[in-house]
Image (cartoon, helix red, strand yellow):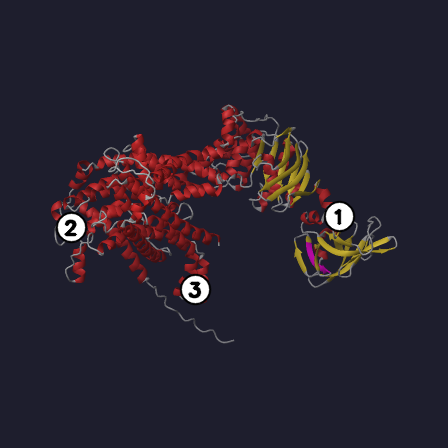
Amino acid sequence: MANIAVTREMKAAGAPPRLSGFGEWCDRHFKWLLVAPAVLLILALSIYPLLFSLVVSFINYDFQIPGHAFVGLKNFELVVFDPVARRALVLTAILSGTSVLIEFLLGLAVALTMMKSFRGRGLIMSILIVPLFISPVIVGQAFTLILQRPFGPTNYILSQILGGEVNISWLTESPWLYFSIILADVWQWTPFMFVILLAGLTAIPPNLFEAAELDGVNAWQVFWSITLPHLGPMILLAITFRLLDAIRLFDTIFIMTGGGPGTQTYTASYYLYTVGFTQFHLSQATAGSWLFLIITALVVTFLVRRLLKVETA
Amino acid sequence: MADVKIRGLHKRYGAFEAVRGIDLEIPDGEFTVLVGPSGCGKSTLLRTIAGLEDVSEGEIEIGGEIVNDMRPRDRDVAMVFQDYALYPHMTVAKNIGFGLKARKLPPAEIEARVQTAAAMLGITGLLGRYPRQISGGQRQRVAIGRAIVRSPRIFLFDEPLSNLDAQLRDEMRGEIKRLHRDISTTMIYVTHDQIEAMTLADRIVLMRDGLIEQQGAPLDLFERPATTFVAGFLGSPKMTFLPGRLSRNGTAASILVDGGLRLDLPAGRALGGAEGRSVIVGVRPEHIYRAADAAGPGEARLDAAIELLQPTGSRTYATFRIGGIPVTAELEAHDAGRPGDIVPLGINLNRVSLFDADTQRAI
Amino acid sequence: MAAATRPVRRRRRVRIPVARILLLGFFVAFVLVPLYWMFNTSIKPSDDYLAIPPVWWPSEPTLVHYEAALFAYRGLDGLINSVIVSTAATVLSALLGTLMAYSLARYNTGGQHLSFWVLSQRFLPPIAIVLPVFLIYRGIGIYDTHLGLILAYTVFTLPVSVWMMYAYFRGMPRSLEEAAMVDGCTRWRAFWTVAVPLAAPGIVAAAVFAFIACWTEFFFALLLTSRNAFTLPTVFRAFIGFQGAQYGEAAALAIVSLGPSIVLGVLAQRHLVRGLTLGAVRG
């Protein structure tokens, strides 16, 4: 170990070169300059379009009717009093609620089985998360291939299992077509729940479980009084994120049923798409999308506030 | 090399004031240690000198120029951080030379300086390695090397030894002291460890709650603490504080300590104040010894029931009680006896500290 | 003292968690079955489509569908466009996102309002944006161009990029950048030469997620592109309708599309939870 025998031979290095005026200005406003590009982009492609669409909601903008006259609340009325719109909204709520619930229960069950490590866990993990990285359109396509009568094997397999002939048209027959849509959604997004809940489960300190085991508590009680309370915030987080995505359901509907038969599988987004891009009643569509935006904002606020309250508790 | 003058410094974070009005003058070439319990503002003060934090109020002057609005890079100071802050993606050589590169020195000169600094610190063999490949002590040297290589006018140390194990800490302490002896640059050193403060400092600045409690040479603070806080902070084991009352008997003064012990103050230690004045007597372990047969001048005697013994080799710390308060005495190992023994002890009243109980200040 | 008794030897029975194996097995099968059937369909000759019982594995696998999907249905063009658009948007998103995240993490720029505003963009229903953007793009002539989609995708992936990098920067000690500044760097230089190299793993992870999001996106691409800049997911439009002849092509295209996103996703597994929850949770 050398001692620090030092001579004073090194001159002072002094201060670094002074910054130019521009450099000075940049350094002083550094933090704002960093956020500027992103903020500008969001303003240009998110806020501005939103405001633009708000304006369009109040005028006539329709490829079928000329002119851009101010029409007050007419566009909003068209949407609110359209029975198809109302049914679409209800269907959106039912489909997303059901899907998220199933995804949650299934995801929780799988997460619980994957808690302890075992051989092959890594491989299974990699397999289970695959659905998350697939385009929803492809997921819809895949299930169409399976369910489609007569090319898909579903009816055949069910016939074999149940003994009798099964000849359901899974993509056009009510109520089976709702089942198909939910199936596709569950297939794709259960891993989402599973991954997040697993993260929450592994974050529970293991000595809580060890203490319970020593105390002789049975598995069911452990689940209710230790696991579930600790998982609470995570559950809320997962459900919030998933629900907010689920209400936008469009891609799978587009591919699997095309909204049909008729308008039976219109979700809110699909309805607005139809009005705006197939019928070209653009101002009606923007009015509807603003209503949908407000509903979404209410749901977001409600859920996020609950989420924040839980986090700070 | 430069001196540092701080006037009326305040630093606020919203409603919280970390530094509440500091005036400090550090002469050129001095080794100043800012010490105190966590939260006292010492690190904040250091960082404002470095320029890493803005000043809410007051002035900082380095080498005669006011640097409040100067960026860290322009102040010509170097800083050694607690977690060494070595750039993990650069070799040791590049780490050391980083500041020189930022100053656009020619590569040949950078190389030369880096070699010199590495040679001084005994880390020449490590120049090609990465920080993750070297030990904690070696990393600390690299951090110091990075500071030396620029020959800055001030060195700042922010608790540099806290992350090292005890043995390394002792070693590095000596090295830093030697470094200062050899290059005599102004050094400002922050620590919470009073041993580091005592051994390294030319001057100690003891801080508490954003203010300077006392500053001066280490022995000054140790032997003549201005407040009970200073007295209790320096020295290990800690000083024991015994509350008591002043009692006059003609020209003689004595203190009646709670628990019945009477301390007759020697002539040299006059005490003002009325009869019954509340005082605190501060006794360090080294002020207590095994009493000889004859009582010496300025000595208080008592028979102590030893409760606890902690031998450290040549010395043993014996704990007993006065008026219910546990007191630790530093005795020769063979004087200590066994737990439960009654041992005659003497307290050197010439050396004890006396404080006013209301103001906590020395009297 | 009583004589010591022989300890009772308990035979350790390995309890095979039957329920766990069943559930996991079922779920793994559940995940794999659609993928298997899709692959199966893509290499099945068309004659086998209507076979009953269904053909589980073709005796004469063929690549005819792949060829048709890529060329006759212009799948290859879609693929190329997807690569261009996704890569460009990913780079832009990672860059802008990292810059903004650094500012938010180190300086708390804009306080709660700015961060909440950026976060909330993630939950904006696309339909509300796409309609006006469609009109705007047509107005300024970037409808059906790479540029138009790249810009839209950048905005669309920014919130996740920002939030992943924000969490990452918060986890990095400031002392490195402070050391750089005391050593002689300006803030920008300290950011670029010290903070960014150190954040490289996080940036890569954010980029992977952004890429996957762009690669799999359908809605924006559907409405903002047409014959020129259409992306891979939009090609599936051609397969809608109940004519069986195209199923092989649809399946083939799907398999082609799956490749990159699955590979990337599995590689980025470690950062998965962070990406899914916008950095709110460390996986």
Left or right of B361? Residue C46 is left
Disc 3 from disc 1: Cα separation: 59 Å
Q: Which amino acid does label 2 sit on?
A: Phe
Q: What residue type is labelled 1?
A: Ala
Residue A193 x %, y %:
35, 52
In this picture, which residue range is highlighted in magenta? B316-322
Q: Residues within 10 Å of mark 1 (few under 14, many from 20)?
A: some
Task: Please state which of residues C187 and B89 is positioned toward the viewer in this rendering.
Answer: C187
Q: Which residue: 26% across, 45% down?
A: A137
- The residue tagged 1 is B362
- The residue tagged 2 is A151
- Disc 1: host chain: B
Disc 1 from disc 2: Cα separation: 97 Å
- Disc 2: host chain: A
Label 2 SS: loop
Position of the N terminus of chain A, as image quadrant, is top right
Give the vertical position of A206 relative to B187 (above or below).
below
Task: Please state which of residues A109 and A76 is positioned toward the viewer in this rendering.
Answer: A76
Q: Can residue B104 be seen in this view?
A: no
**Residue A213 has which mark?**
3
